[in-house]
């Protein structure tokens, strides 16, 4: 069983900063790519940022230069540092982890998905 627990959301004024955390746990072989998504009211869920197990990152154009994704050395916690927040960043932010359940799955490259419960970020103007 894989669990992702997010924290760090809240209310902030435009121009402010927040840091989201996502702690992953479970008896699995390895966590691989870890991803932050967000979903604003009435909109589809969108990818915000991705970090590979090797530390390579990728960002949505809308957050480049403002958000930074990172993960700890044990590679089981992922962070999203959000600076210069804008009202349009208001959304529920979800953590997603790709993982191999066992060694055999790693040989085949069969990633499984786990999702957190989401944390609300509200940016006031």
Image (tube, rainbow, N blue to C red):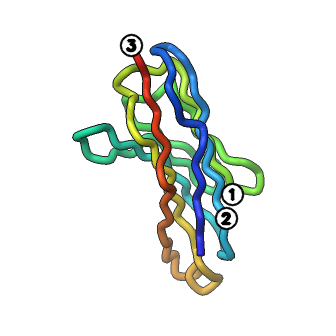
**Which quadrant of the rendered structure holds the C terminus?**
top left
Label located before the other in sequence (3 or 2)? 2
Identify the secondary structure beneath mark 2.
strand
Identify the secondary structure beneath mark 3.
loop
For label 1, the residue is: 76
Identify the secondary structure beneath mark 1.
loop
How crowded pointer 2 is (Cα within 10 Å; few <14, some 14-19, many 20+) is rated as some
For label 2, the residue is: 25
Label located before the other in sequence (2 or 1)? 2
Tell whether label 2 touches label 3 (CB within 8 Å).
no
**Which quadrant of the rendered structure holds the N terminus?**
bottom right
* In this view, the mark in front (1 or 3): 3
For label 3, the residue is: 125
* In this view, the mark in front (3 or 2): 3
Q: Identify which residue is drawn at 65% across, 83% down.
A: 103
Q: Which mark is residue 7?
A: none
Determine whether 113 is above or below 53 in the image.
below
Q: What percent of the width, then of the height, locates residue 95?
A: 51, 51
Q: CA distance from mark 3 to mark 2?
A: 36 Å
Q: Identify which residue is drawn at 48% across, 55% down.
A: 117
């Amino acid at each position: 069983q894989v669990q992702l627990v997010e924290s760090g959301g809240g209310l902030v004024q435009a121009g402010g900063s927040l840091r989201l955390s996502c702690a992953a746990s479970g008896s699995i072989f390895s966590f691989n790519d870890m991803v932050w998504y967000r979903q604003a009211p009435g909109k589809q869920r969108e990818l915000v940022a991705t970090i590979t197990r090797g530390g390579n990152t990728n960002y949505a154009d809308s957050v480049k230069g403002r958000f930074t994704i990172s993960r700890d050395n044990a590679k089981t916690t992922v962070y999203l540092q959000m600076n210069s927040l804008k009202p349009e960043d208001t959304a529920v932010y979800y953590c997603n982890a790709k993982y191999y359940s066992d060694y055999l799955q790693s040989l085949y490259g069969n990633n499984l998905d786990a999702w957190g419960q989401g944390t609300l970020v509200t940016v006031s103007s």
